[in-house]
Image (tube, rainbow, N blue to C red):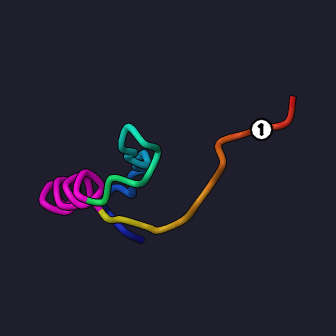
Amino acid sequence: MTRSAFVALVTCFNDDETINYAAARAQVRRQVAAGNNIMCAGTTAISPP
């Protein structure tokens, strides 16, 4: 069993709706520096009504 957190990160977008990779890298680096784990997964965050 792991003793550290797995965090959900938001997808960072630029004003033109392309992915902001620099901001995404900064988020990942901040979480890793804090001792958290990163798990790559995806979701639309949409649930049925």
Q: Is residue 24 above or below residue 41?
A: above
Taking the spot 22% from the left edge, 57% from the top edge, the residue there is 22
Residue farthest to the right, as pictured? 49
The residue identified by callout 1 is: 47
* Residue 40 horizontal/vertical position (percent): 47, 68
The magenta segment is: 22-36
The N terminus - image quarter: bottom left
Q: Residue 38 occupies which quadrant of the picture?
A: bottom left
Taking the spot 38% from the left edge, 37% from the top edge, the residue there is 15
Residue farthest to the left, as pictured? 33
Q: Is residue 18 magenta?
A: no
Q: Is residue 26 magenta?
A: yes
Q: Nearer the viewer, residue 19 or 9?
A: 19
* Residue 45 horizontal/vertical position (percent): 65, 42
Left or right of 34? Residue 28 is right
Q: Nearer the viewer, residue 45 or 12?
A: 12
* Residue 30 horizontal/vertical position (percent): 17, 53
The C terminus - image quarter: top right
Q: Is residue 24 above or below residue 13?
A: below
Q: Is residue 14 above or below residue 41?
A: above
Residue farthest to the front, as pictured? 16
Left or right of 24? Residue 45 is right
Taking the spot 40% from the left edge, 54% from the top edge, the residue there is 19
* Residue 42 horizontal/vertical position (percent): 58, 60
Q: Residue 48 occupies which quadrant of the picture?
A: top right
Taking the spot 33% from the left edge, 53% from the top edge, the residue there is 20
Q: Decide: few, some or many residues near mark 1? Use Cα within 10 Å; few <14, some 14-19, many ≥20.
A: few
- Say which amino acid is labelled 1: Ser
